[in-house]
């Protein structure tokens, strides 16, 4: 790997760690860079998932204040994220790459719609039923599905999680973002262990992305915690729609 290529991967890791802590979708920084440098898609996905796991941890630590009082949610939803990530890893190593190319952008776009409509939907739901601190029986199923997606591809899993939890939980957006970071770490760490065991990552890429994502995750969390709810909601939607458009363009041009 040339020096400029290593710097490009490192910079992409910093950007991915930062955007994952604030919103999600950091893989859309690193994955295209790895493909442009000539790495095979599965190798790029595997190496990227392993490298982003440490950054997901620093992002979650950066939001530790907003995680207070959410221990039961982390445990309940973390189990579903764990099993979802394993399922996604198995799918990545056994299914054709084209399977999710249409489904993924649709999921991201739907999550963006849920985030935009969340305040009105929550108000409507509160009029029809009492608030449920853990989101009701269907939310864990959605968390599992997000874990499957995260273990398979990872890009924008945070946006999908925020969309699901925002619709189901009567909670402030920053606290949902903190919970999203914790669950994303569970998915990324589980996928990383799975891929280390069963796949063949490029360890140069892993090291560069890991180093960059740790820095990005730390500073991204410090920045993201200061955003007002409206600004955070707008940022999530803009990045989510950009991700969906980019993935759809890859389908039609590739």
Image: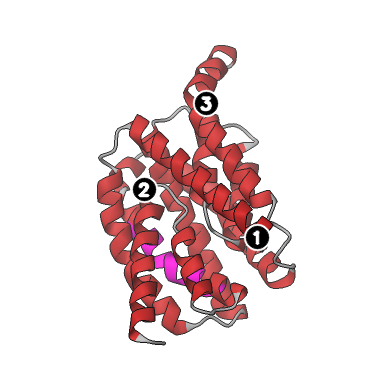
Point out the image quarter for the C terminus: bottom right
**Which residue appears at 46% of the width and 83% of the height?**
203
**Which residue appears at 64% of the width and 51% of the height?**
104
Q: Residues within 10 Å of mark 3 (few under 14, many from 20)?
A: some
Residue on which disc 1 sits: 253
User: Which residue is nearer to you in this view: 232 or 142?
Assistant: 232
Task: Report helix, strand or loop for mark 2.
Answer: helix
Q: How is the image coloured?
A: secondary structure
Q: Position of residue 108 (x, y in %)?
A: 58, 45
**Which residue appears at 74% of the width and 68% of the height?**
96
Q: Is residue 123 above or below residue 180?
A: above
Task: Report helix, strand or loop for mark 1.
Answer: helix
Q: Is residue 121 above or below residue 222?
A: above
Q: Residues within 10 Å of mark 2 (few under 14, many from 20)?
A: many
**Which residue appears at 55% of the width and 67% of the height?**
191
Q: CA distance from mark 3 to mark 2?
A: 20 Å
Q: Residue furthest front?
A: 253
Going from N to C along the chain, the mark reached first, 3 or 2, is 2
Residue on which disc 3 sits: 117
Going from N to C along the chain, the mark reached first, 1 or 3, is 3
For the magenta stretch, what is the residue range?
46-58
Q: CA distance from mark 2 to mark 1?
A: 30 Å
Mark 1 or 3, closer to the camera: 1
Q: Could you tell me if residue 134 is visible in this image?
A: no
- Name the main secondary structure of what is drawn in magenta: helix
Going from N to C along the chain, the mark reached first, 2 or 1, is 2
Q: How many marks?
A: 3
Q: CA distance from mark 1 to mark 3?
A: 32 Å
Q: Is residue 161 left or right of residue 173?
A: right
User: Is residue 100 located in the magenta-colored stretch of the structure?
Assistant: no
Residue on which disc 2 sits: 22
């Amino acid at each position: 790997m040339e020096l400029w290529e290593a710097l490009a991967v490192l910079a992409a890791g910093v950007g991915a760690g930062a955007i994952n802590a604030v919103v999600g979708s950091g893989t859309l920084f690193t994955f295209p860079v790895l493909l442009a440098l000539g790495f095979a898609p599965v190798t790029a996905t595997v190496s990227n998932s392993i490298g982003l796991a440490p950054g997901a941890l620093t992002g979650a630590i950066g939001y530790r204040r907003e995680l207070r009082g959410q221990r039961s949610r982390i445990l309940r939803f973390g189990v579903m994220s764990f099993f979802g990530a394993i399922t996604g890893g198995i799918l990545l190593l056994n299914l054709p790459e084209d399977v999710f190319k249409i489904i993924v952008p649709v999921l991201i776009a739907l999550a963006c719609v849920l985030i935009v409509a969340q305040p009105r939907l929550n108000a409507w739901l509160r009029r029809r039923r009492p608030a449920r601190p853990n989101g009701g029986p269907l939310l864990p199923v959605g968390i599992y599905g997000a874990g499957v997606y995260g273990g398979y591809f990872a890009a924008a899993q945070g946006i999908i999680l925020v969309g699901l939890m925002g619709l189901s939980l009567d909670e402030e957006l920053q606290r949902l973002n903190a919970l999203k970071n914790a669950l994303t770490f569970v998915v990324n760490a589980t996928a990383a262990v799975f891929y280390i065991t069963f796949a063949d990552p490029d360890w140069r890429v892993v090291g560069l992305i890991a180093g960059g994502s740790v820095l990005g995750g730390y500073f991204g969390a410090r920045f993201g915690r200061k955003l007002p709810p409206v600004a955070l909601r707008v940022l999530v939607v803009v990045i989510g729609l950009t991700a969906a458009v980019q993935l759809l363009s890859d389908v039609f041009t590739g």
